[in-house]
Image: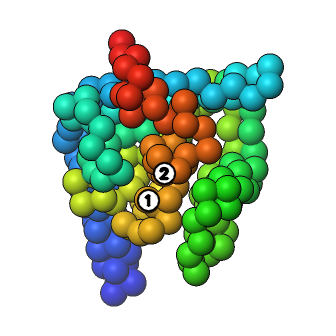
Amino acid sequence: MQLRNIGIALVAVTLLVLTFTISALEQHSWRQVGKAKLEVLFWDVYQARLYTPDGNFKGIKGPLKLHLTYYIDIDGADLAEETGNQWQEMQFEHADNNTWLRQLKQVFPDLQENDSLTMVLDDNDVGYLLHNENLIYRFEPSVQLNQFLAIWLSDKSTRPKLMAKLTGQNAQKD
């Protein structure tokens, strides 16, 4: 009987946390800051769009939403590996980077053409990763979460033109 009560309590807590998480993600009305397409050689890889509540980018802090729509199939493990490659090029060195990259290999889904990945950073800088608008992971605030978003949003980005378009330095709103 006690085991059943514990099970019911766990389900109730899970539903409460999920409800809180969903309401945290929906509390803002998002306005587009900018958009950019990543092209590598002859291939379109993804379309990126950045949103904030007021349509202005004020740095890598919540609330903000980075939405990527992929034009190609890509393996989740390859996404995690590319994250590590970007961090190396950007000279982001932190003791916990390898742990975070191993976590990303477990979290990132395999993507098919037209799939989307969205990272929402809330008012408390907690990150929520969505795959095709479904929540798949919650990240506590960390150096690595900031470094992850810096790939697209930082002056250290390896793709400065893409970063400029996304952050509104080259305004391209619709």
* Vertical order, 15 against 30 (above or below): below
**Which of the 4 image quarters holds residue 75?**
top right
Give the percent coordinates (x, y) of residue 144.
Answer: 50, 65
Between 144 and 26, the one lying in front of the other is 144
Q: How many marks?
A: 2
* Vertical order, 144 against 25 (above or below): below
Residue 25 visible in the picture? no
According to the picture, the residue beneath numbered tag 1 turns out to be 146
According to the picture, the residue beneath numbered tag 2 turns out to be 150
**Residue at image location 50% in from the left, 59% down from the top:** 147
**Residue at image location 33% in from the left, 60% down from the top:** 126
**Residue at image location 60% in from the left, 38% down from the top:** 159
* Vertical order, 29 against 158 (above or below): above
Q: In the rendered structure, which amino acid carries the disc numbered 1? A: Asn
Q: Is residue 57 left or right of residue 170?
A: left
Q: Is residue 85 left or right of residue 22?
A: right
Local packing at callout 2 (Cα closer than 10 Å; few below 14, some 14-19, many 20+) is many
Give the percent coordinates (x, y) of residue 124.
Answer: 24, 60
Q: Secondary structure beneath disc 1?
A: helix
Residue 141 visible in the picture? yes
**Residue at image location 53% in from the left, 50% down from the top:** 156
Give the percent coordinates (x, y) of residue 36.
Answer: 52, 25
Local packing at callout 1 (Cα closer than 10 Å; few below 14, some 14-19, many 20+) is some
- Could you tell me which quadrant the C terminus lies in? top left
Report the colour scheme.
Answer: rainbow
Q: In the rendered structure, which amino acid carries the disc numbered 2? A: Ala
**Which of the 4 image quarters holds residue 16?**
bottom left
Question: Is there CB contact under 8 Å for labels 1 and 2?
Answer: yes
